[in-house]
Amino acid sequence: MSAQNFLPPIPQPPHDPTSWLLDAGVGWHDAHLIRLEKSSAVRSLVFARLPGSGRSLMEPGGSFGGLTLSANVALGPDGSLYLLDAKTLELKRLDPCECSFKTVPCFGGEGGGARQLRNPHGMGICGGNLFVCDTGVSESAEPVLCDDANQTRKKRNNERIHRENHRLSVFSLHGFALRGHWRPPESACQPADRKLAKPWEPYDIAFDGRGRAYVSDRANGCIHRFSPSGQWEACLPGFDQATYLALDCRDQLYVVLDGPERQVRVIAADGTVSEIADQPEALAPLFPRLPFVVDAQGNLHLGPLCAQTETGKEECETWNLPAAPERGVFNLSGDPATSGPAAAPPAYQPQGLYFSTALDSGLYRCQWHRIILHAEIPPGSRVEVSTYTAEALLTDEQVQMPGLPWETRQCANAMPAGEWDCLVRSGGGRYLWLRLEFTGNGKVTPVIDRIVIEFPRISLRRYLPAVFGAEPMGADFTDRLLSLFDTTLRSIEKTIDTQARYFDPLSTPAARDPKTGVDFLSWLASWIGIALDRHWSESLRRRFLKNAGKLFDLRGTRLGLWRQLLLLLDMEAEANCCPGDRPQKRCRPVPAKCAPAAELPCAWQPPPLILEHYRLRRWLFLGAGQLGNQAVLWGKRIVNRSPLNEGATVGHTQLKTIRDPYRDPFHAYAHQFTVFVPVRHRCSDQKRKALENLLKTESPAHTLYHVEYVEPRFRIGFQSMIGFDAVIGRLPQGVTLNETTLGRASVLGAPPHKQGGPSFEVGQEGRVGTTTTLG
């Protein structure tokens, strides 16, 4: 038996090298970091920032270094800006024409009423509701003499003030009607047999992607979580003196702890809690960009917001109001202010070092191929890559000792975000150690997102005569020369392997070519004769092209137009149906040999959207019809025809070219239809143009369409479609013992004076006809 049988098999095509991946997801496998840190924000290797430089996550106002709005500022769904003035206890709204804050009437003031406040801090808007955190008064009442009637009354009033307004008030943005006060149960954050140590003090509020509300409780050192409907769900303990909250695009919760050692903690989506570095610039990719700037002093720079608001421009032009200033700076009370001194730019360590642990290839005398860095290296910094290989496993201390023959030593200099690679110059060895030496000017930092280490080296040298690899130096030169072609050919092979994704509308590239201006998604649509509207979003274009084949045989029909409208308006049953909406079956065991049960249909069905005018005819049948609302006699003047030799009134009759006056009803109504669309598509120019283009190109031939934008209102005889633009409901009238069954129509709540709804208290609340009904 030859010795060649004991050697590992030579890799053959089309096998590609395998790789080691180092990143925050699978782990960096770092043995030692010097002046570097693994940023939990962007999950990258970066320089450690010098303390005291740059902006801080714990700046006043709770803006987290300008990443989010201040705690007392909220953006409405229509782009309106609201500010809660904690000094005057008033709610203010930005006027885009005058670029100033105007006080909202009938809201605010000190007291325990429905719309009154004591000590507000945080505010937020979600789901068309306005949330206000009122921490109330926490100081204890001053001792007074109990024998004096005035002092006794003052003491009782003082105690009442300290009890009330510990609440999270929920108001409707339309009219600021009070929806209720949210409170956690008394057993929150405590064992079942204990109660809250202190009345809760809601300080700030934040909302995740599912609409759940997180409220910081400064008094009890915890964070409460409420469902979108206001039901208390859980309490996250261990956050003493928690104040400001923020949620990023990954639903990670950031909490500012205002204690002796102020710090910021992050709660990941899986519930793990950790401390993060104080670097707002590193967290910026995780937060949506604000339409204006919040500086380090908490001031709001709203000049660009006022100047760029289209609605504000139209209103200013309509009422001939003065134009907004180019720059409008306001403090946290909504008053004009001057911009404070700019924060010092961030400063970083000038040098850093990364050592990896031993990376095992599992191959005897493995020749490692190349190192790929997915990174961004700004000008003024560089990263030097060095490798060391060995057949025996060494400890981390042995590898870091001086004197080892480190090889490769390739430098990655200034480069934008992308890939950089280099060949591994170290010899064969089962284990590889990686060393990265960071160098910078103290003003910038390289950002290493991930590292890919490919092995073994599969070179085109295997097709050449053996003489090109007989000598180690010659083999290394040949491999390095052929690696230029290896990388190019392998990229072509990878494109061919993944070519199928170009023919799937859900995965084909949608970025426009900078030279031709055409994207592959639109080009793919042209293969089947479809021109995608440029006003559509990328997701809509992908879904429309995916379903185009099913709609070909329906084009030019009402059903085909209806399905395309559902795609455009995002009203497909598959996308809007929740598992809880499906009809429920009785739980009964199924025999093992039975076929899988069919999926239950969704209880929610999309609206019809289209009304054909011929359906509005009210026919009169001989022997069965009666004149009235259900039957109308058609007349000759249905189109205001002006017959000759008969009376004709100027302004009432008109000349028509319809040749048959007895079929005027068919000529006037048979070819028309109306499309009912939510009003939000009228407010957006992009959505309105997309709708108009769809109706122009996809309407049945020789038809006229009318668009009716539906607003949330209920008008009997004009606009009232239950389930589409109107919902019938009633206010709860209380629960009667032995008559009311507990369920979705009956809710047990707090006493009337604590709930904030209809109640009757002599001397406090008693408004006949509004909150009180005499019976």
Image (cartoon, rainbow, N blue to C red):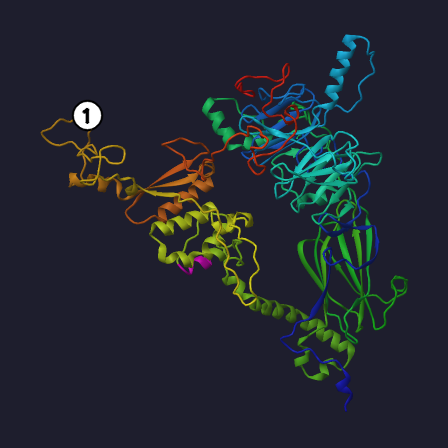
Position of residue 506 relative to residue 220, above or below, is below
Query: Which range is magenta?
Result: 523-528
List the residue tagged with mark 1: 650
Tell me where residue 237 appears, x and y as whole percent.
Answer: 77, 40
Between residue 220 and residue 628, name the one nearer to us.
Answer: 628
Q: Amino acid at mark 1?
A: Val
Q: Which quadrant of the rendered structure holds the N terminus? A: bottom right
Position of residue 440 relative to residue 553, above or below, is above
- For label 1, the SS is loop
In percent of the image, x 39 and y 34: which residue is there?
719
Identify the image quadrant of residue 382: bottom right
In percent of the image, x 41 and y 50: which residue is there?
563
- Is there any visible trace of residue 65 in the rendered image? no
Tell me where residue 324 appears, x and y as whole percent.
Answer: 56, 26
In the picture as drawn, the residue positioned furthest to the bottom comes out as 1
In the picture as drawn, the residue positioned furthest to the front comes out as 738
Between residue 655 and residue 152, name the one nearer to us.
Answer: 152
